[in-house]
Amino acid sequence: ERCVPPLPGRPASCFLQGSVADLPWPSRAFDVTMSSDVLEHVPPELVDLAVAEMSRVTRRLMVLKISVRKEGRKPSLKALEEEIGRHIQLHETVKHTPFWIDKFSRHGFYLRSRIRTPGHLCCAFVLQANDSLLSS
């Protein structure tokens, strides 16, 4: 756990680091969760576990933004690849909105709304827990 010193008149902010495939919080710990530019980095073999964990800790709403393209080949990435002698794939799971909605629906979440994003670089949407999850 890391804490950031408080700004005047504000409480300290603390962060707990963990894997999206094994989140360190109890079930239904948060009314709303947000994930921005995370899920595309999850290896395909861990996607189902990551989706299950995100669903487990979320009580009501999830706000998700997920890249739908492979990472750009920036000079800094190319230089690192040359240095280590192998290709680096940062975006391991590149899928579109229906894929993600289907995955989360298996854990009781449905599409509440889409969020408009510029261009076709990512998908963004809000998922809501179904009534049976809200009552638990």
Image (cartoon, helix red, strand yellow):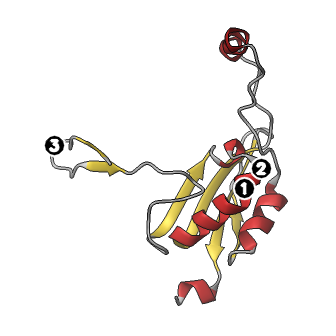
Residue where numbered disc 2 is placed: 44
Q: Amino acid at mark 1?
A: Val
Secondary structure beneath disc 1? Answer: helix
Q: Is residue 117 above or below residue 105?
A: above
Q: How many marks?
A: 3
- The residue lying at 78 percent from left, 45 percent from top is 93
Mark with earlier residue (1, 3): 3
Where in the figure is residue 18, as x and y percent of width and height?
A: 48, 51
Q: Amino acid at mark 3?
A: Pro
Where in the figure is residue 114, as x and y percent of width and height?
A: 72, 60
Residue where numbered disc 3 is placed: 8
On the picture, is 6 further left or further right than 61?
left
Q: Amino acid at mark 2?
A: Pro
**Residue found at the very far front of the displayed protein:** 85
Given contact means CB atoms under 8 Å apart, are the residues at marks 2 and 3 in contact? no
Q: Give the CA separation, mark 2 to mark 3.
A: 44 Å
Label 3 packing within 10 angstroms: few (<14), some (14-19), many (20+): few
Mark with earlier residue (2, 3): 3
- The residue lying at 32 percent from left, 48 percent from top is 1
Q: Give the CA separation, mark 2 to mark 1.
A: 5 Å
On the picture, is 85 further left or further right than 17?
right
Given contact means CB atoms under 8 Å apart, are the residues at marks 2 and 1 in contact? yes
Q: Is residue 12 above or below residue 26?
A: above
Residue where numbered disc 1 is placed: 47
